[in-house]
Every structure is written in structure tokens, then in C-alpha cells.
Image (cartoon, grey):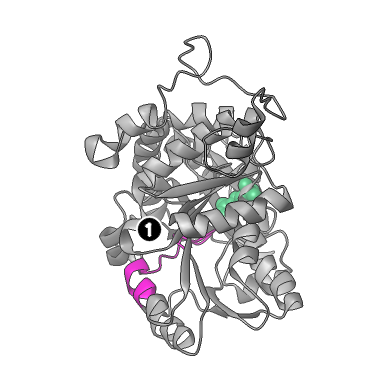
């Protein structure tokens, strides 16, 4: 099944499926087998050399994991994919594969907290220069790329303030400098955005979030040119950050409703953002679907939908954040995002807990910010819930305190 033959709703369900795997089962079995037995030793040798299709050892490949990879490959319109135990494993293994001492990576300040730690604490230890630019200053990013860039690493929309970077524009600059261009597409999902079609070399997902969509399995995946993905796969074979087949099964099952969930989450987030934007106790709302969003035009150009993630700053201090959050009935106060349930969290305890208060301030993340991952509930109920929670917030008191 290829991209041109079907729509994303159909691909979510059918891509990579339909292979007869075991006793005509319609669902992929969870292959818990560590290894695969060969009576014909020549066959075994051919599979080991990659001359024949098959599996040898599950740290390297596994049929359940492969089916998950295939579904994402088709949805991202990629030539190849390889998966990982977590999103961070996908990100770190990709960067370690691509970069060598003496090289330089250019990225933005607003990457995911864990990614930011890789840039600030790990890569410099291996003699890799890291340049983190102001996320929305495209001229600055272009000028830094021109100074020398082996990897251009982007994330859009960003976590947690939903900034949007122009993928086409920066990819052109990266290509001109001879860089490999990588985009973390976790927030957008392949339903809303396909960076590979905009010229990007590699797309990464934390499958833990929207792809799985049910907060019951961790996973990561890299998609792109076969030549690059093969190198990353070979690196992962050795580092061993393999996706577990049970997790692959959960992620696959979740992905069958991906298009359906994202359509609802896009809708809900837009409604919630519009409601909050007009609320007197709200200082600012960050959502690329709002016409007031500074990069709304860029978002419109490169995204089919604006996603399920938003964040908002409450008037007042952290007490207001606590009051609002604890009074929400239809939301988990938790560290993840992208699930069917609405999830809220302050960046200081979720995405950017690894950062110090000072680092968060430098990254432009206000302490009175709430990250809101819209679930698939009724938008009407979510808005009513926010209304009653915000009613409990005493802005005056919070400001005076
Ligand atoms: C969660 C997240 C990651 C890390 O993924 P894990 O599966 O938690 O390791 C990376 N990037 C973004 C944008 C994320 O939201």
C-alpha cells in the first residue's frame, strides 16, 4: 500500500497490516521470541548478511516491531524507519550516529527538555559544538547555519510554548551548508505535518505521545532516507535501545485511531484556545491555530491541522497555576501528553523539570504557564471544566501575594 493510493484515515488503519503472520490472525501477534531458529545454516547466513528477509535476534529486528515501523513509514511518506525504546533513545542515537568530534550542530532553544540536555551536557563532552538559537529568529538561525553546520535539528511546534519554525526555509539553509536536517515531529504527528515532504532528511517521533495515544507504552521512531536510517539502525543494534514487542503492539493498536484522534484533538484544542484567549484571568494563550499567534501564517503553510497541544499563562503566580490545575475534573495532572485523556502540567514539573528555574527563564518559559494536552473528550465539557476551575482562581489575591 503506498501513500498515493489512500488517505491518512485509511492508512492509520491499514498501512503495514494484512500480512499473514500466524494462523491467519488479523492482528499482529506479539512475538516474544528473542531469537529465530534456522534448520538450514545457509539460509541463516543469508539472513544475517541481509541477502534474505528474516529475523535473527530481537535486539536487531522483530516482526511485531517491524509492523509498527512500517505503519509509521507509510504515514510519514518515508523510505525507511527504525524504532527505539523511547523518544529520547531515538533522538540521542540519531545525534550520536550523525555527529563526530569537531562537528557542529545548530538547533533552537525551545527543544524538548531532554533534547536540550543532550545539547548542553552530553554532546559538548564529545567535542561537538552546539549552537542553540532563538527559536523564532529565522535570520539568526540562517546566519549560524552558514557559519558551519553538520546537523540542523528542529522541533515544531515546540514544547511547551508552541512556537513554529519555517521548515522549508531553514531546510534550504541547512542543505546549502551540507547539513543533515532533522525534525522532531512529535507535537504535529504525521496527520498534521510531514516534514520529509518539505525536504527534511529525518523525522523523529516520541511514539509515547500521540502515535500510541493511550499513555500505556513508551517508544520512539526515526523516519527518512534509507541510507541514513540504516546507519542509525546499525548504531542502535549495538547500543541496544530496542523497542519492546509488547510496546510495539500497544503503539500499533493505538495508531489505528490516529487520524480519528488527531482530528478531534485539533478541533478541541482550537475551541479551548479560543475560549481561553477571551478569558479575563488568562494572560496569554499559545496555540498556532490562533490568528494572533506570531507564526500562524507559517503554521498554516506547513501544517494541515494545528495539533492538540496548547499552553496558557494564568494571571498571577504559581498559586494560581495550582488552584486552576487542581480544580480540573477532566484532566490528569501528569508529565506526558498526546493521550486520549486531557493532561495538564506545569513545564517546571513536566517537559522542563531537568532545567533550573534560571534555565527555564532563559528559555522563555513563564512559571505561571500550564501545558494543556487536549484529549478526545467533548470540547464543551473541557471548556466548562476550565471555566469552573478558573472561577476558583483569585487573581487579585495571587498578584498581591
Ligand atoms: C516526550 C517527548 C520526547 C521524548 O520522548 P520519550 O518517549 O519520553 O523519551 C521528545 N520530544 C518531544 C517533543 C516530546 O514531547
Near mark 1 (Cα within 10 A), the count class, few <14, some 14-19 or many ≥20, is many
Q: Secondary structure at mark 1?
A: helix
Q: Main secondary structure of the magenta part?
A: loop
- Is residue 162 found inside the magenta-colored segment of the image? yes
- Dividing the picture into quadrants, the one containing residue 35 is top right
What residue is drawn where x is 49% and y is 12%?
25
Stretch in magenta: 155-172
Q: Measured along the vertical axis of the image, is residue 154 above or below residue 241?
A: below
- Please give the residue where the numbered disc 1 appears in the rendered image: 195
Q: Residue at x 43, y 45 (%)?
A: 308
Let me know if residue 129 is in the magenta part.
Answer: no
> Could you tell me residue 325's position as x and y percent?
61, 45
Which quarter of the rendered picture does the C terminus lie within?
Answer: bottom right
Residue furthest to the right: 125
Quarter in which the N terminus is drawn: top left
Residue 398 makes an appearance in the image: no
Residue at image point 45% right, 18% down: 20
Q: Is residue 108 above or below residue 325?
A: below
Looking at the image, residue 377 lies above or below residue 391: above
Q: Position of residue 236 (x, y in %)?
A: 66, 52
Q: Nearer the viewer, residue 160 or 17?
A: 17
Q: Is 231 placed left or right of 202 in the picture?
A: right
Q: Is residue 298 above or below residue 130?
A: above
Q: At which x and y percent is residue 114? A: 66, 60
Residue 100 place in picture, x, y as percent: 65, 75
Say which of 283 and 374 sits in front.
374
On the rendered structure, is 306 left or right of 393? left
Amino acid at each position: 500500500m503506498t501513500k498515493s493510493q489512500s488517505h491518512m484515515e485509511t492508512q492509520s488503519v491499514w498501512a503495514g497490516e494484512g500480512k499473514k503472520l500466524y494462523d491467519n490472525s488479523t492482528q499482529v501477534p506479539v512475538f516474544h521470541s528473542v531469537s529465530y531458529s534456522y534448520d538450514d545454516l545457509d539460509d541463516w547466513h543469508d539472513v544475517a548478511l541481509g541477502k534474505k528477509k528474516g529475523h535473527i535476534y530481537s535486539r536487531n529486528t522483530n516482526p511485531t516491531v517491524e509492523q509498527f515501523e512500517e505503519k509509521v513509514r507509510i504515514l510519514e511518506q518515508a523510505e525507511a524507519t527504525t524504532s527505539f525504546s523511547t523518544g529520547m533513545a531515538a533522538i540521542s542515537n540519531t545525534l550520536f550516529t550523525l555527529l563526530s568530534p569537531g562537528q557542529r550542530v545548530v538547533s533552537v532553544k525551545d527543544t524538548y527538555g531532554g533534547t536540550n540536555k543532550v545539547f548542553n551536557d552530553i554532546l559538548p563532552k564529545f567535542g561537538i559544538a552546539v549552537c542553540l538559537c532563538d527559536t523564532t529568529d529565522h535570520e539568526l538561525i540562517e546566519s549560524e547555519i552558514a557559519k558551519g553546520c553538520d546537523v540542523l535539528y528542529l522541533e515544531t511546534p515546540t514544547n511547551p510554548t508552541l512556537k513554529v519554525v519555517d521548515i522549508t526555509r531553514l531546510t534550504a539553509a541547512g542543505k546549502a551548508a551540507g547539513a543533515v536536517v532533522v525534525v522532531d515531529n512529535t507535537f504535529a504527528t504525521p496527520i498534521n505535518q510531514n516534514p520529509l515532504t518539505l525536504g527534511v532528511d529525518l523525522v523523529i517521533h516520541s511514539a509515547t505521545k500521540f502515535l500510541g495515544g493511550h499513555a500505556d507504552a513508551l517508544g520512539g521512531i526515526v523516519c527518512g532516507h534509507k541510507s541514513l536510517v540504516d546507519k542509525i539502525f546499525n548504531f542502535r543494534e549495538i547500543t541496544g535501545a530496542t523497542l519492546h514487542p509488547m510496546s510495539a503492539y500497544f503503539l500499533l493498536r493505538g495508531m489505528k485511531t490516529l487520524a480519528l484522534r488527531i482530528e478531534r484533538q485539533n478541533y478541541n484544542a482550537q475551541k479551548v484556545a479560543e475560549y481561553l484567549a477571551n478569558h479575563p484571568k488568562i494572560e496569554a494563550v499559545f496555540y498556532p491555530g490562533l490568528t494572533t499567534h506570531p507564526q500562524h501564517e507559517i503554521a498554516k503553510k506547513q501544517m494541515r491541522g494545528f495539533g492538540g497541544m496548547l499552553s496558557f499563562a494564568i494571571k498571577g503566580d504559581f498559586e494560581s497555576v495550582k488552584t486552576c490545575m487542581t480544580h480540573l475534573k477532566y484532566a490528569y495532572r501528569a508529565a506526558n501528553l498526546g493521550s486520549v485523556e486531557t493532561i495538564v502540567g506545569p513545564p517546571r514539573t513536566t517537559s522542563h523539570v531537568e532545567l533550573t528555574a534560571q534555565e527555564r527563564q532563559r528559555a522563555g518559559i513563564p512559571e505561571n504557564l500550564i501545558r494543556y494536552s487536549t484529549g478526545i473528550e467533548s470540547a464543551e465539557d473541557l471548556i466548562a471544566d476550565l471555566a469552573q476551575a478558573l472561577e476558583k482562581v483569585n487573581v487579585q489575591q495571587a498578584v498581591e501575594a
